[in-house]
Amino acid sequence: PALGLVMLILVVSGWCILLPFMPQLQMATMQRFHLSSSDYFRWACQQPIPAMYNLENRYWIADSPILVDSSGTTPVAPAGVSEAFKPIDSGFANHFPTRVLTFGDGRHKYLCNSDRPIYLMVESRYRGRSLQTMFQCIPVSPEGSKGGFKLFRIEQRYEPMRGEEPSVLSAANEKGRAR
């Protein structure tokens, strides 16, 4: 038992020390925060890793799909939507930015005020890299905190450091998760 604990401490410490230097660990951490780890094993292995304050996490919630301008920080109206486009809500989250819809206060607030789908854009940034994920969020049972949302990942974009190629990682994911 003691050896297992020591090994766990060494692995977690190694992850934290190597995070600033390894793009693969940075991407895995950002995907964890966006509920998009490639498989359950990868997600489960990251659970002992501290989640607080290691990435810049932002979120925007709107009635229509959200686009972000070329600076990567300002939401803009999609084509065909009024220039007066304003997100319903936006802000920073210490960790797991999707929790603004899945935890008590946010879930209750948005379920009570929405009988139709809403859209959540989350973005995590770390050392010049960025991961943006757009979710369509469908109320499952809009009864205040008794209900939840089913999240459908519409698109996910990875913005690497200068000199690396940006990519669209996924689009129109058919899987939904009730949260």
Image: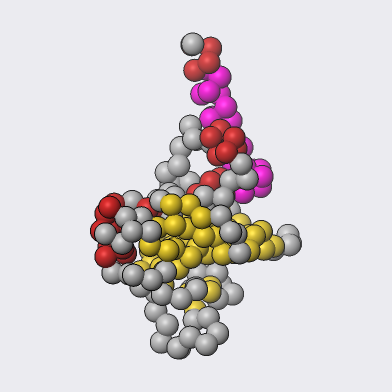
Q: Is residue 116 left or right of residue 4?
A: left
Residue 100 picture quarter: bottom left
Q: Is 25 inside the magenta-drawn segment?
A: yes
Left/right placement of residue 35 relative to residue 102 reads: right
Name of the residue lying farthest toward the front: 141
Judge by depth and name the residue closer to the eye, 36 or 141. 141
Residue 105 image point, x, y percent: 27, 55
**In the image, residue 166 lies at what x, y percent?**
69, 63
- Can see residue 132? no
Q: Residue at x 32, y 69 (%)?
A: 114
- Residue 131's place in the image compared with 80, above or below, is above
Question: 60 or 64, which lies in front?
Answer: 64
Q: For the point 41% across and 87% down, which residue is it?
A: 84
| Of the pair 113 and 90, the residue shown nearer to us | 113
Residue 152 magenta: no
Q: Nearer the viewer, residue 144 or 161?
A: 144
Q: Main secondary structure of the magenta part?
A: helix
Magenta region, residue range? 6-27
Q: Position of residue 26 (x, y in %)?
A: 60, 47
Residue drawn where x is 38% and y is 59% of the image:
140
> Can residue 48 be seen in the rendering of this structure?
yes
